[in-house]
Amino acid sequence: MKSFSLLPLAAIAAALVIPDAETAQSLRLQLQDSKPQSIWDSLPSADQIWADAEERVEQVVGCAKHKVENVVDTVYETTVKYDNQFRTAFAGDEWLASKQDKKSPEDHPPHHGPPHDGPPHHGPPDHHGPHHPHHGPPNQTVYQLIAESKYTTRLAKLINEYPDLVEMLNGTKANFTVFAPTDQAFEKIPKHAPKPSKEQLKHILSYHVSPEFYPAGRVLVTRTIPTALGAEFIHAPQRLSTQVSFRGLTVNFYARIIAVNIFGTNGVIHGIDSILLPPPKVADIITSFPGEFSTLELALYKTGLFPAFNDTKTHHGGTLFAPSNFAFQKLGPRINAFLFSEHGLKYLKALIEYHGAPDVTLYSDAIYKHKEDSESFPDHRIPKGIYHIDLETGLKGKSLSVDIARYGRLIEIKINGFNRVAVSDGIAADGVIHVVNSVLIPPKEPGMVSLEADDTLTVEELKAALAPFVDQIEEGKSGWEL
């Protein structure tokens, strides 16, 4: 097995041992009447994944575990950026730090393939960890498990204020997944944060619940998860993201999962050490990180596109392939001087329009398309393997060719055949952001290779590529502004 596959596997294994043993064990014991089963019992066919690299993985994991145990957690207030109403949070620094592996899963798929999403039919070999026998099926709902635990008293108290949430978590309409903040998680709320309204609080609680069944094994191979909170500006479920790193298994980069697979009769609970807050809008994320997007922000303001991108009445969701500051630097000083000059602004506007797809929200493992005639959404999962889609951009009649190679957590996104997404799944309230380290330039003809966006590109070549769309932009036919 290639070394690029060992690091994610090592991180996955480390994620299972990071929680403080006493804390995690006490939480599990409180939430279950019976003795909890080994965490390995929740992993689907893990022995099949690691069979051909077992010794090497164990060596890497042993080293990783030693280092992880000495890591000091990042202070919550500096990790998460709040708005002034304590309604949204985004761990942007950690998201931007999650650069994609240079190796491509498309070129080197795992030998045995990813684990399946269903429950395991048998446990892995005993040498992976201690094995505990099963103690029969659960006999309490996920709500009852939360309500009776002394470690989730504050969560239970909040849920009890909303009879419809209680009814939902006691019901059998779905197999729910609850990411349950412990009482200690509530202690991390900044003291200066204003108290959210009752409506805002319900949104926050709904964001901790998924109407789909995600035991630990499925969480480990899933990048984004739908929640019970409707995304107001997408008209679809608001999603959260999961990560596996040497910090452990986390949700939205800052909430660590400290207890897993507490099964109820109608779902599963995972204990987390921080409260999850719904994400901000795309425009707010862009403006919050000038070190990465100051040039893009300037482009949005100078072209007059910022209000359109920020106005959710003109589009329902959307996907932005956001060029980083480095991407603009690669163009060289001459092209940048032209684009941001009075004569180049119309070309800059066309260029920015080409980086966004209004009304289509494309995550690395899910897609939502706006349909005015329907409020129901079918299965939006992107299948494993290779997935291709043409996204119509803000330039009418011009699409981005997007290919997603997906094998479990290993995901790579390529645009127009060779432009790789550097950082994916910046989940927002009104869409999603994928960071690209090269400015995207539309090819002259469908199927043709687009020009290289570097300092070898001339102003004349750039103008020729964008000229067909300048008249369209000047006539006000922007896909983001209609």
Image: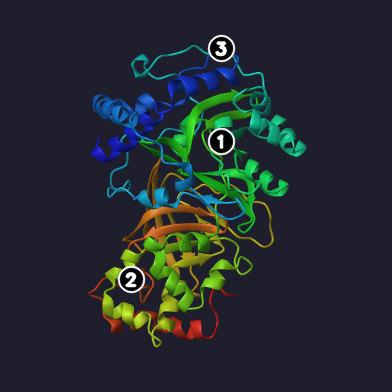
Residue assigned mark 1? 187
How far across and how far down the image is residue 426, in percent?
A: 46, 53
Between 184 and 241, the residue placed more toward the observer is 184
Q: Secondary structure at mark 1?
A: loop
Question: Which residue carries the number 3 mark?
Answer: 135
Residue 384 at what x, y percent from top left?
A: 43, 44
Calculate the distance from the C-alpha at mark 3 to the C-alpha at mark 1: 34 Å
Residue at left offset 43%, top offset 62%: 321
Establish if 23 lies above or below 461: above
List x then y, in percent, for residue 409: 40, 41
Tell me where residue 69 appears, x and y as whole percent. Answer: 34, 28
The residue carrying mark 2 is: 448
Q: What's the residue type where badge 2 is placed?
A: Met
Of label 3 and label 2, which has the lower sequence position?
A: 3
Q: Mark 3, residues whose alpha carbon is within 10 Å: few (<14), some, or many (≥20)?
A: few
Q: Residue at x 54, y 30 (%)?
A: 271
Quarter of the image for residue 110 reads top left
Q: Amino acid at mark 3?
A: His
Q: Name the one closer to the observer, 66 or 194.
A: 194
Badge 2: how crowded within 10 Å, few (<14), some, or many (20+)? few
CA–CA distance in space, label 2 to label 1: 56 Å
